[in-house]
Image: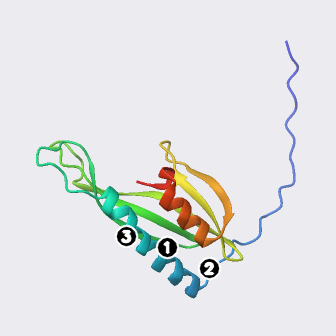
Amino acid sequence: MAKKTSKQWMYSPKRGPKPKASAALKEEVSRRANALLENVLKPARVVPPPPDMEWNYLVNLYTRWHGSYFYLCGTWRCPADNCLSEFFDLKFTRLEYAGNDRFNLAYMRHTGQWATVFPALTLDDCLEQIETNELFWP
């Protein structure tokens, strides 16, 4: 039988504060992301449902800031008779402000955890990835 290793205490230094996005940067990100949603994602992903639909379907896309995080979110409708709520919201893409006008781009996994795929991208690169990569679509 293998001998168990003893547990040890280790020093873990505190992390520095997260960088905060300026109001001007937040406004620019919101403006450009909303334009991307209106011109690219909404026409492709938000479609009118068939009348006999029993499955959840996407009814709206929107954006929101929460601290240093910028989210792309969707509102879904559940038309089933036994649903808990007729509408629910899900976040599907996250841009985390990393400082120096760079963002960490992540998507929501099926496990409910955020997976950062592209660290330290510019806003242009983030929006290009969201537009072309289906991983960041609802």
For the residues marked 1 and 3, what is the alpha-carbon distance in whole angstroms? 20 Å
Q: Earlier in the sequence, mark 1 or mark 2?
A: 2
Q: Please say whether residue 22 is visible from this viewpoint.
A: yes
For the residues marked 2 and 3, what is the alpha-carbon distance in whole angstroms? 25 Å
Q: Which residue is mark 3?
A: 39
Q: Please say whether residue 93 is visible from this viewpoint.
A: no
Percent from the top left, x then y, of residue 34?
Answer: 42, 74
Q: Quadrant of the C terminus?
A: bottom left
| Relative height, residue 91 to residue 127 (above, below) | above
Q: Amino acid at mark 3?
A: Asn
| Relative height, residue 63 to residue 89 (above, below) | below
Residue sitting farthest toward the bottom? 24
Residue sitting farthest toward the left? 51
- Contact between labelled residues 2 and 1, with CB atoms less than 8 Å apart: yes
Q: Which residue is mark 2?
A: 21
Q: Earlier in the sequence, mark 1 or mark 3?
A: 3
Q: Report the front residue among 102 and 110.
A: 102
| Relative height, residue 49 to residue 72 (above, below) | above
Q: Which residue is mark 1?
A: 65
Q: What residue is drawn where x is 65% and y is 70%?
A: 122
Q: What residue is drawn where x is 61% and y is 66%?
A: 125
Mark 3 nearby-residue class (10 Å; few <14, some 14–19, many ≥20): few
Between label 2 and label 3, give the one nearer the viewer.
Answer: 3
